[in-house]
Amino acid sequence: MKPAVFISGASKGIGLAAARKYYASGYRVGICARGEEALQLAKEEMPELVTFTCDMSEKAAVKNLARKINEEMGTLEVLVNNAGSYIPGSIHEEEDEAYEMMIRTNMDSAYYLTKGLLPAMKAAKKGAIVNIASIASLDAYPGGGSYSISKFALLGFSKNLRFEMKEFGIRVISVMPGAVLTNSWAAYDGPFDRLMPPEDIAEIIFTSTNLSNRTVVEDIVLRPQLGDL
Ligand SMILES: NC(=O)c1ccc[n+]([C@@H]2O[C@H](COP(=O)([O-])OP(=O)(O)OC[C@H]3O[C@@H](n4cnc5c(N)ncnc54)[C@H](OP(=O)(O)O)[C@@H]3O)[C@@H](O)[C@H]2O)c1
């Protein structure tokens, strides 16, 4: 049977590039997003793709999604916690709602989805969980604000989960990209070739989950060749 991978927030950007990579490599691929239209386009491109509509910022919706993935996809070989949103801001000026929304979307979504899917993976005693953090998980930077808080939290989640999952044979990988050319950069008016292509991030996610199960790639930091923007 084909190994199964689920990628959250994958109708566009890094998630979609990762879905394409796993799909082309023979995996059974499941993805989710809020918008139906982009999910439908992805399915037209990859007919065997399994799609779910879900707002990952809603705890009840995420728990329900986990139930559906367990039913429709069975035990996952790979889970990629990718869903995230970025509202630039600064802690001392931004709206409370920006903080709450990014914690829910970028951190809580990974927490609840992982907890819903882990029992089957733990029973299988194998698999990999990739958390798409950010260079915003590592340092403060201008405009980071609550996005950076949420990504620091996600990195902390990833480190603790890796520690806990060792005995279950599940490898937990943190990926920290700098600027990647996706919709997140729609407002950017500089040269686009300064940004990394999403396919590069997809390639490293795929490779990190396809080494021998005696090796865990703990932390991956990727930056534009000419440095951060
Ligand atoms: N691009 C970068 O420079 C960069 C750098 C470092 C880290 N990252 C991280 O990489 C991940 C992917 O970013 P990206 O740039 O590829 O994003 P993107 O191009 O904006 O795509 C985001 C994807 O997630 C879905 N999504 C957004 N909010 C969602 C929600 N609440 N529930 C379910 N799905 C949701 C979107 O579909 P819908 O809108 O239809 O829901 C879309 O499919 C994020 O965690 C981001 O923080 C990005």
Image (spheres, helix red, strand yellow):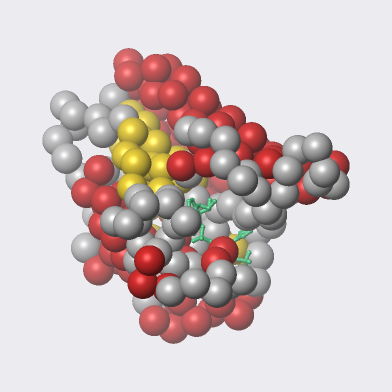
Residue 76 at x, y percent in the picture? 38, 45
Residue 183 at x, y percent in the picture? 55, 69
Camera-side residue of 106 and 20 = 106
Q: Quadrant of residue 200?
A: bottom left
Residue 214 at x, y percent in the picture? 16, 27
Query: Could you tell me which residue is drawn at 26 percent across and 33 percent down?
Result: 217
Q: Is residue 10 left or right of residue 212?
A: right
Query: Could you tell me which residue is drawn at 50 percent across and 82 percent down?
Result: 41
Q: Is residue 101 left or right of residue 85?
A: right
Residue 55 visible, this angle:
yes
Up-down: is 50 above or below 3?
below
Camera-side residue of 106 and 25 = 106
Up-down: is 191 above or below 74?
below
Up-down: is 155 above or below 98?
above
Q: Is residue 60 left or right of residue 39?
A: right
Residue 126 visible, this angle:
no
Residue 161 at x, y percent in the picture? 45, 24
Quadrant, the N terminus:
bottom left
Query: Could you tell me which residue is drawn at 68 percent across and 41 percent down?
Result: 145
Ligand 1 shown in quarter: bottom right
Query: Could you tell me which residue is drawn at 33 percent across and 33 percent down?
Result: 219
